[in-house]
Every structure is written in structure tokens, then in C-alpha cells.
Image (cartoon, rainbow, N blue to C red):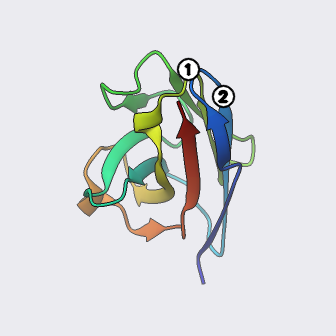
Amino acid sequence: QVQFVESGGGLAQAGGSLRLSCAASGRTFTNYAMGWFRQAPGKEREFVAAINWNGGSTLFADSVKGRFTISRGNAKNTVYLQMNSLKPEDTAVYYCAARYGAAGSSIREYDYWGQGTQVTVSS
């Protein structure tokens, strides 16, 4: 059974930083891209960032480019999202996800999902 353990969410002030972690288990994630999505209250879930299997390719939503970075751990089943220069509009539940193949931004392409971690940014 595939499981994702997400951590690192919490409360931050505008301009501050948070680092999200996601550890996946239950299968081998060779050739799986991993990504982060977020969903704010009353809004649809949206793409944030993704990274391919070996970390050589990344994608970012325009809204977070230059502020967020994504990386994978050496074991490849862990993914991190470093969030800097946080804004109140970054407030959302952040979800980790995995898909076979290249990094992508479409929710429909992702096969496995975590339960989410809350990020709240105060002004």
C-alpha cells in the first residue's frame, strides 16, 4: 500500500520560509516524478512544482517561480519543497503526489497522493 507522509507545514509570516517534506513508501518509485499541489479554501487544487526521477528536471507554477524550490532526497522516495518569501496567497493545503514518467503539471497525470499539510501565511 502506497503511503505518503507529509510534514513541515504550519504558520509563517509573510516574507518567511517553510520547508515541506514528503516521504513515500509502499513501492519503488523508480522513474516516478513527484510533485506538489495546493488547494486554498473555495478554490480548485492547483499545480505548484514537480521534479523528475533523477532531479534533473523541474517545473514550477508561475506564481511560485523564484520563491520555491523542489528537490529529491538521495533515496528518491522523498521530495522537498522549500518555500521562501511566502505570501498570504500561498495559504493552502499542500499535497504531495507521484506519477510515472516525466514531471508534469496536470493533476490527472498523478497516480498517488498524500493527505496534505496545511500552510498558513499571515500578513
Label 1 CA crowd tier, 10 Å (few <14, some 14–19, many 20+): some
Note whether 83 is above or below 95 in the view shown.
Answer: above
Residue 116 in view here:
yes
In percent of width and height, residue 1 lies at: 60, 84
Instruction: Please give the count of numbered marks on the rendered protein.
Output: 2
CA distance for labels 1 and 2: 6 Å
At x 54% / y 27%, what residue is drawn? 86
What mark, if any, has residue 85 been given in the picture?
A: 1
Outermost residue on the right side: it is 74
Residue assigned mark 2: 17
Depth check: give the residue in front, 31 or 24.
Answer: 24
- Image quarter of residue 85: top right
Q: Position of residue 55 (x, y in %)?
A: 55, 33
Q: Is residue 33 above or below residue 67?
A: below
Q: Secondary structure at mark 2?
A: loop
Is 73 situated above or below 99? Answer: above
Q: Earlier in the sequence, mark 1 or mark 2?
A: 2
Tell me the quarter of the picture where residue 59 sits. Answer: top left
* The residue positioned farthest toward the bottom in the image shown: 1
Q: Position of residue 57 (x, y in %)?
A: 44, 28
Q: Are marks 1 and 2 in contact (CB under 8 Å)?
A: yes
Q: Whole-percent x and y of residue 27?
A: 62, 72
- The amino acid at mark 1 is Ser
